[in-house]
Image (cartoon, rainbow, N blue to C red):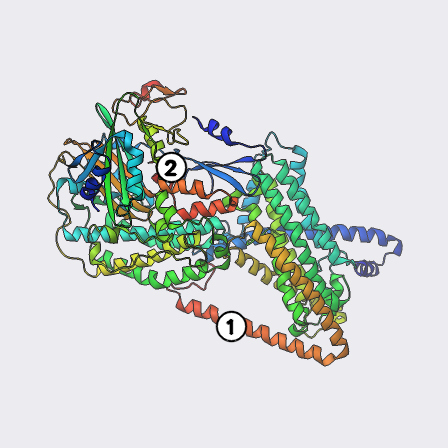
Amino acid sequence: MTLEERLNAVKRDNEILLNMGPQHPSTHGVIRFIVRSDGEIMVEALPVVGYLHRGIEKLAEMTPYAGFIPYTDRVDYLAAMFCNHAFVMGVERLLGIEVPRRAEYLRVIASELNRIASHLISLGSMAMDIGAFTPFLHGIRERELINDITEMLCGARLTYNYMRIGGVSNDINDKILKKISDFLDRFLPGFIEEFNRLITYNEILVKRCVNIGTISSEEAINFGLVGPNLRASGVKWDLRKNMPYSVYPEFKFEVPVGEGFRGSVGDSYDRFVVRVKEMEESAKIIRQAISSIPDGEIMAKVPKRIKPPAGEVYSAVESARGELGYHIISDGLENPYRCKIRTGSFSAMKAIHIKSQGCFIADLVVLIASMDIVAPEIDR
Amino acid sequence: MLELSDRIIEYFGLSHQYSLIVIVVLFFVYGLFALTFGSLFAGITSWYERRIAGRMQSRIGPNRVGYQGFWQWLADGLKCWFKEDIIPRDTDSLLFRIAPYLVFTGVLCTFVVIPFSPSVVGSDMNVGIVYIIAITALVVAGILMAGWSSNSKWTLLGGIRSTAQMISYEIPVALSLIVVIIPAGTLSLQKIIISQGGAPYNWYIFHNPAAFVAFFVYFIAALAEGNRTPFDLPEAESELVAGYNTEYSGMRFLFFLFAEWMNLYVIGGIATALFLGGWRIPGVSYEVQSASIWLEFLGFIIYLIKALILVNVIIWLRWTLPRLRIDQLMIMCYKYLLPISILLIVISIIFTILYELFPLLGVVVRVLLFLTSLLILGYFSYRVYYNIKNFPDKVYLKWMI
Amino acid sequence: MNINEVHSEVVKFFPGKISDVITSGKLSFFYFDREIIYDLFLVLRDKIGMEFKHLSYIASVDMKDHFELIYCLYSYRWGSVIHLKTRLNREGPHIRTISDLFVAAEWHEREAYDLMGIVFNDHPDLRRIMLPDDFEGHPLRKDFVEKDNYHGIPTRRDKILGRF
């Protein structure tokens, strides 16, 4: 079956076909939606993906393990640390390497900083799609500080390539710690309060987001949603708490769950507020981490040629967009035999397809923005 | 205009048979003046808006072209002049070409009635306000033509939405202006300004509580008519990729933007003329002011300042608030603004009759409303001071850098 | 419940069609025959005590002489994750879809069809998802050779400069 056959099978006479094409100011990345509507109310918004397919899973079969880490950055360039972390964790489990504690603390600090940066972009783009241009730029201003920190840490501002099999690549020093601490003093509570006053409590945003795309908790589990989308529907599931990895059990933090803050449980406003609260929790984790970094090595003893014994492993982290998992099958050689990447945005696309029936075109934009999808995660 | 022509004829000592020629020449000069003023205002507002938007978003805004980027609008205009004139192939080409001019003309013709100073006004028609509401219907026709003739589903949607929005919001605009016409007793803008006083508590906004609320109703409805945020869904970038002006490029596109920025001055100008006392100077009566040329100039400056403060508020709103959806827009017009403005007309009539019977009541209500608004302004200044003090960054009060 | 408990429960329903629990590397899983897929997943999803209602992913692997499909299920109620596998022929692989049980399966099965060529019977909308509709071949297979050109665009990456 082709796309034309699929569309012609269901087309009726009083509908128009609109194309929110691959290039569009509000789809987040190159994703295409074919909207069938009668002018304002949509019957269906069919997603067409694949414009950013780079064949990362096939490339994994031709790349050595240590050389694959920069590829994992590009799976989700807005939250690249998590992608690195999941892959590296999987290979370490296969090899049976124990990562030194200092390296684990550095991984956690870098990951949580990246979570804040990713959420700033996601909330800012959602506000920009609804028409408020200013919160996006305020978020970018804070994100610049995070980018400066990671530039001092590992030399890159977007695709970090920071983690190595067995640890991390660069060590942290007092200057970077001071800079992180200054950023946190300014971020929580000053910036969060200002951001909330500017946009989260804004009546117009509330009216635009409330009761749009309401997903109940059973539906969310069935759709395969993860991350803030799932938690906003009322399901209290966070991989950092339920299936702990790394040194997360040593930190005290809450997991925000949507409870229908201004509308029903699981609508777009819940997803917005859950992300704001997650930013606060991340800031708390970083504060606890930088005050108690242990001394030690940053890299374990790893063989020069990494050839894990034949076997499989599935390792997942709680990324900014949900669960990011790598299913690595190794056959004892230098390259993985198969590397399957499980991302959160892929499942969210089906949810958008189902929930877009019967709402306005303007609501479709809000729905897409609230699910926080990025094109590279879908297409890999 | 007629008095001005009489004075010119006396000054130059010409015979009265040339009065028709003098009037025609004066109209021509005034038209040029209005066109220049409108275009200059549109250009300078574009620079001002971009700078203000930059400061609100923690960045600078254009600052390269000229001192503090002041000639940015000239550079943009010149660039668009020299651009290739692209007309897509399957468009209705006559409508496509006419549409920007209709929109521009519709907004420019309102400058005929807006008074700049006691004797500089294009034509002090005695149906001034009705004329304004009627001539802005040209804008509606222009936008509909633009949306239809571009031969694209997205622009058609944008054009239809914009048309529906503009013709719906003309009703609250008209009704809220009637609230002020009732105490004034005349539809001509110049005479309404004359019948107000100079000092702030003599303006029509404090005349009765209905006029106070009518100012805000007019402001909101005029924003919606001018397609400004929070009502700019027809030209929303994220949903419709600039709506009805997607297929326009170069100078034709600039005409739409010109019309939008000129409309800002029209909104500010009409609101000032009707509610905020126009060009009246506190303590100076109309005869004294129209006799001396310095006081006329001062009146012009005062009018400009008041209108510019309102333009400032409009720009501020644009970069803060998100957008309303089309059905929320329509609900706000028909379910909220329309009944409120009808109610305000009734209240205004009651108060005007009461003031005829008890003149003291008028003074008391005026003073109370004036004090209330002073309190609101004071609270607002306190909040500004509080925010500046608690902001984690150093606030650069030197806005020029 | 973890993989061993699930295995002992499920073996009672489908004797002879479930293999033993295999541990390969750090992952434990069991194989099931492809005919029982619908009933097996119905049991896994709805039986009290298991309630694996979240389908995480469906991965397709090309073992040299057969295909394998890996299903990963999460149970949020009991906080556990299991992996299941099934074997398919290399010539004409087909298996029944589970997209009427798990809505998430629709897109994962489309991806398996697109990249590996596994046909899912009764799927509501089986067409290519990442690659263009007129692409020939299934890239994730180990014996996939790229065509020389796609609509006239050459695809060989060596000797590019010599062409001009």
Residue at position x 45%, y 29% in the image: A3
Q: Residues within 10 Å of mark 2 (few under 14, many from 20)?
A: few
What amino acid type should be assigned to the residue bearing mark 1?
A: Tyr
State the mark number for residue B379: 1
Residue A196 spot, x, y in % from top left: 42, 60
| Left or right: where A330 falls relative to B305 | left
Q: How many marks?
A: 2
Residue at position x 74%, y 80% in the image: B358
Q: In front: B334, or A142?
A: B334
The residue sitting at the bottom extreme is: B360
Q: In front: A148, or B78?
A: A148
Q: Is residue C92 above or below residue B157?
A: above
Q: Which residue does the numbered mark 2 point to in the structure image?
A: C100
Secondary element type, mark 2:
loop
Quadrant of the snapshot with the N terminus of chain A: top left
Q: CA distance from mark 2 to mark 1?
A: 60 Å
Which image quadrant for residue B161?
A: top right
Chain identity of mark 2: C
Quadrant of the snapshot with the C terminus of chain A: top left
Which label lies toward us, 2 or 1?
2
Instruction: Say whether residue B244 is visible.
Output: no
Residue at position x 43%, y 42% in the image: A352
Q: In front: A260, or B146?
A: A260
Secondary element type, mark 1:
helix
| Left or right: where A376 falls relative to B225 | left
Which image quadrant for residue B207?
A: bottom right
What amino acid type should be assigned to the residue bearing mark 2?
A: Asp
Residue B280 spot, x, y in % from top left: 69, 68
Residue B251 spot, x, y in % from top left: 60, 40
Check if mark 2 and mark 1 are on a common chain: no
